[in-house]
Image: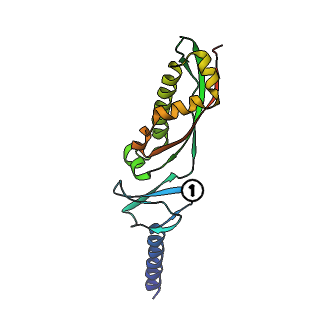
Amino acid sequence: MKGKKVGILIGVAAAVVAVGASVTVTQQNEYKLIRQFGKVDRVISSSGISFKIPFIESTQSLPKETLLYDLAASDVITKDKKTMISDSYVLWKISDPLKFAQTLNSSVESGESRINTAVYNATKNAISSMSQDQVITSRDGELSDMVMEAIGTNMDQYGIELLKFETKQLDFPM
């Protein structure tokens, strides 16, 4: 009789663990990737409770909100061969979580690395096509527009959307 109660208790505990392992909660500010044997099976983009197959499917969260990437200050050379220091930032978000997972292995750091390369090259090219005086007078948004235009839709291949590029500081070297 006592062994039967212990067996029932163990069975109920196992059922509770299995049900708990099959429930996943998606918050408003995130995408939930459901992976089956490491491969993305589906993406949940709406908030709420979802179910997965316990022990076969796993979940991973990706941010849905706008992210800030602060680029390191770097030297750039103008058309008239004068050096300036550019310090800027980018606002971005994950626009296609499946593509982001497939191309960048769901890594925000890898996404920021791609953004860094694209934005640095676009900034360098834009500034190198202008004289120092033009760079100084283009701080009102013209430089930002040139950089965003140069990048274009290049980040779409990674499931990333660049929302805004801004220069925090554009200065002469010390």
Judge left or right: residue 46 versus residue 98.
Answer: right
Residue 29 picture quarter: bottom right
Q: Position of residue 49 (x, y in %)?
A: 51, 68
Looking at the rendered structure, the kind of residue marked 1 is Asn
The reply to whether residue 71 is in sight is: no
74 vs 104: above or below:
above
Q: Position of residue 161 (x, y in %)?
A: 49, 44
Residue at (53, 21) in percent of width and height: 127
Q: Position of residue 137 (x, y in %)?
A: 64, 22
The reply to whether residue 11 is in sight is: yes
- Which of the two residues, 99 or 20, is positioned nearer the viewer here? 99
**Looking at the rendering, in which quadrant would you find the N terminus?**
bottom left
156 vs 79: above or below:
below
Residue at (56, 19) in percent of width and height: 75
- Which of the two residues, 107 or 136, is positioned nearer the viewer here? 136
Residue at (63, 14) in percent of width and height: 173
Residue that lies at the very extreme toward the bottom in this rendered image: 1
- Which of the two residues, 103 or 143, is positioned nearer the viewer here? 143
Residue that lies at the very extreme toward the top in this rendered image: 81
Circle 1 SS class = loop
Residue at (59, 21) in percent of width and height: 135
Q: Which residue is mark 1?
A: 29
